[in-house]
Amino acid sequence: VRGLRLRPHVKTHKCIEIGQLQLDAGATGITVATVSEAEMFAAAGFDDLFIAYPLWVDAAKGARLRALSKRARVLIGVDSVEGAAAVSAHLPPGSIEVLVEIDSGHHRTGCLPDAAGGVALAGVRAGLVVRGVFTFPGQSYSPGAAEAAATQEAESLAAAATSLQAAGVACEIVSGGSTPTAALTNGETLTEIRPGVYVFNDAQQLELGRCELADIALTIASTVVHRTSVRVVIDAGSKALGADRPAWTTGYGRLLDHPDARISALSEHHATVDFPDGEVAPAIGSVMRVIPNHVCSAVNLAASFVVADAEASEVWNVAARGANR
Amino acid sequence: VRGLRLRPHVKTHKCIEIGQLQLDAGATGITVATVSEAEMFAAAGFDDLFIAYPLWVDAAKGARLRALSKRARVLIGVDSVEGAAAVSAHLPPGSIEVLVEIDSGHHRTGCLPDAAGGVALAGVRAGLVVRGVFTFPGQSYSPGAAEAAATQEAESLAAAATSLQAAGVACEIVSGGSTPTAALTNGETLTEIRPGVYVFNDAQQLELGRCELADIALTIASTVVHRTSVRVVIDAGSKALGADRPAWTTGYGRLLDHPDARISALSEHHATVDFPDGEVAPAIGSVMRVIPNHVCSAVNLAASFVVADAEASEVWNVAARGANR
């Protein structure tokens, strides 16, 4: 579609069954955040894994990456000359592949686009197989920011690709990311995208205008334990929903069946839900379906999914829960 | 000490070994947040458990509580007439004990102090064994608020005890909570306290002035993966530290060895650390010890603790990780 390969980020679901559905639907490989996520998916037979992170490789991590590279194609991120040197110090030449991470405006990790060629060349000289460049345009997580972020992402990646070519390093892979920008990206500059959240969506995507209520595929069932006429407290707190709460969100999550209600306070086992004028709060004992703000955080707190349609349900494990190192 | 029994909240550590150390040091029982935490600790031999939560008891939860009550003394919270009726509908008379939760100013769960007698009497008439009252003065989690919260906690509990007595219900247990107020409470009104965080402390307690850096007993080891001269990015994010970030905190956690540094941004696998003028940021590859804002959230994300002193270390499990239902 649009000349782009899809390499979905499986940190969102950490689930073998869902990853397999993504491959079945045409994904050309998966993205993970950590070596332990890569290990979990490789053990399940996934054979094309990109750890989209500027790993600091020491002897222990090097040994794990060597073991991984024997059962799957492994790509990792590098964003500095020091990082490239550490990779080459602990891994045999050619055992893994490398993408240079660039900062396309999120200002987290990644080198400047113009510096990508220097990092790539240092990697090549140290014996690494450098395949291209990648970025995460996280500035897309702000209301109205997705379009500008997608433009900045494409321009920065184009500059980085030029920088590699100027340094004499071929740039086969140009990889972008983020669910808010996924639909705004095309294959003019990028060769692949790595969205994660899209598979479920969540309250952040809803409030960013990047999905509709009907696109929400995961909720957390919880029970009203306390009630006044305009407010209830439910038994899902930060240990079920996650505590993510950017300033631009309207609360700590949303209720699927009460779109005008807002979660105004959250503690470990309590969410306080306020209802608007004229809406009567549900009775004590009622079950509410909560949409978490950030579904990746919520999934990592659960042992399993209940996967249901109108006829049947089954349980799938969050196989890589806690696999965050 | 101060005429108070200690019933520590083990949701902070979820660890059998630490709970046993607390009992060995004189705790008279433990507090848990959920039925599944109670099940985990009961299976390990803990025999006096207070689930400090206004549980909504249905048939499934009733069956679990009946099984629990056969191996341990079990107390649960009730804060409404409906809640008391649900408990008595699903549990044999006398199988568990009940404390009435009151709102002492945190405005989360709990009935008003003057309403406690009515809830207690409804419980007694429904066949419940009502032992007293409890509260969580969560308004103590704000700078300078601990003293007033402790006063409000004691006054509210005194009013609730009076309300029970006026309804003809004996009030043997008067239970308060919260680490910020723990040292400000005495046995004039309360009979027990239920702090949790005190066992480790965390960045919130530090910034509230309720502990010193030397009192911090848990940190998360993480590695510098990206660096400029005044900023680093480390590989511990919200999936290791938790995303708790009240408005009054100075960031998303603190660094034990760099007290003037601040974590200005957090995502799932990245924390951005800013260093003040004149302090040189640590080198890429350095290991940093991160103090989480809210240690209860951070512990729930980990599979185990490394327990170390100058001579030796061992590994203790977070036995009740994810036991949040």
Image: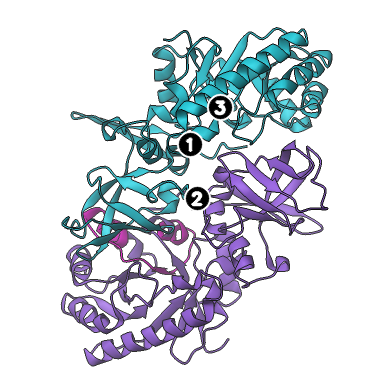
Chain colours: A cyan, B purple
Q: Mark 2 lies on which chain?
A: B
Q: Give the range drawn in magenta.
A: B38-66
Name the residue that disc number 3 marks: A32
Q: Can residue A45 be seen in this view?
A: no
Q: Where is residue A264 in the image (x, y as percent from the top left)?
A: 36, 57
The verdict on a common chain for dots 1 and 3 is: yes
Q: Give the amino acid type for the residue marked by disc 3 in the picture.
A: Val
Task: Give me the residue at 24% from left, 84% from top.
Answer: B117
Q: Position of residue B203 (x, y in %)?
A: 62, 61
**Horizontal side, residue B278 vs residue A72: left or right:** right
Task: Give me the residue at 37% from left, 84% from top.
Answer: B156
Name the residue that disc number 1 marks: A141
The dot on residue B321 is 2
Mark 1 or mark 3, earlier in chain: 3
Neighbor class of circle 2 (other Cα within 10 Å; few <14, some 14-19, many 20+) is: many
The verdict on a common chain for dots 1 and 2 is: no
Q: Give the amino acid type for the residue marked by disc 1 in the picture.
A: Tyr
